[in-house]
Image (cartoon, rainbow, N blue to C red):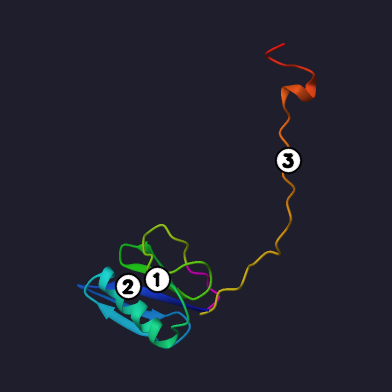
Amino acid sequence: MGVFTFVCRSSGAEWTAKQYSGDLEGSAASTYELQRKLVQTALAVDSSGGVQSSFSYISPTSAVFQVIIGGGGGGGFISGGGAAAAAPSGGAAPAAEAPAEKKEEEKEESDDDLGLSLFD
């Protein structure tokens, strides 16, 4: 699984992006074009699975863009505001998988269990 985090900045009519911890870069006239280019750049480095991405504005002229390749039950290209911002852990996100816990289903109490019934 590859995680690529980019810091994006607008300068006039152009958006530029530099990988937070790495050498990947890109630039484009719009944020949409920039996201597409950065996904293709990340796929050139790691094409091991499905692609997920998130773009979050920090200010009107700066943003964080994260591309995750492989991993979870994804696939397809996902993009949109309001997604989780990038962690300052560099290019790799920690695997925060909790061990699977077995949960017992709670049985709902019915009126019969209490000795009450609507139809008596």
Nearer-N-terminus badge (2/3): 2
Q: Is residue 89 magenta?
A: yes
Mark 1–mark 2 CB contact (< 8 Å): yes
Residue pointed to by mark 1 = 65
Identify the residue at horizontal 24%, vertical 77% (top origin): 28
Q: Is mark 2 on a helix, strand or loop?
A: helix
Residue pointed to by mark 2 = 35
Q: Local crowd at mark 3 within 10 Å, few (<14), some, or many (≥20)?
A: few
In screen coordinates, is 87 left or right of 58? right
Q: In this view, does 59 lie above or below 92?
A: above
Mark 3–mark 1 CB contact (< 8 Å): no
Identify the residue at horizontal 60%, vertical 73% (top origin): 94
Quarter holding the C terminus is top right
Q: Is mark 3 on a helix, strand or loop?
A: loop
Nearer-N-terminus badge (1/2): 2
Identify the residue at horizontal 43%, vertical 60% (top origin): 83
Kind of residue sitting beneath label 2 = Gln
The quadrant in which residue 102 appears is: bottom right
In x, y percent, where is residue 111? 73, 22
Identify the residue at horizontal 79%, vertical 18% (top origin): 115
Magenta region = 86-90
Residue pointed to by mark 3 = 106
In screen coordinates, is 53 left or right of 87? left
Looking at the image, which is closer to me, 71 or 113?
Answer: 113
In front: label 2 or label 3? 3
Nearer-N-terminus badge (3/1): 1
In x, y percent, where is residue 35? 32, 73
Residue 116 got which mark? none
What separation in Å lies between label 1 and label 2 (alpha carbons)?
A: 7 Å
In x, y percent, where is residue 48? 47, 82
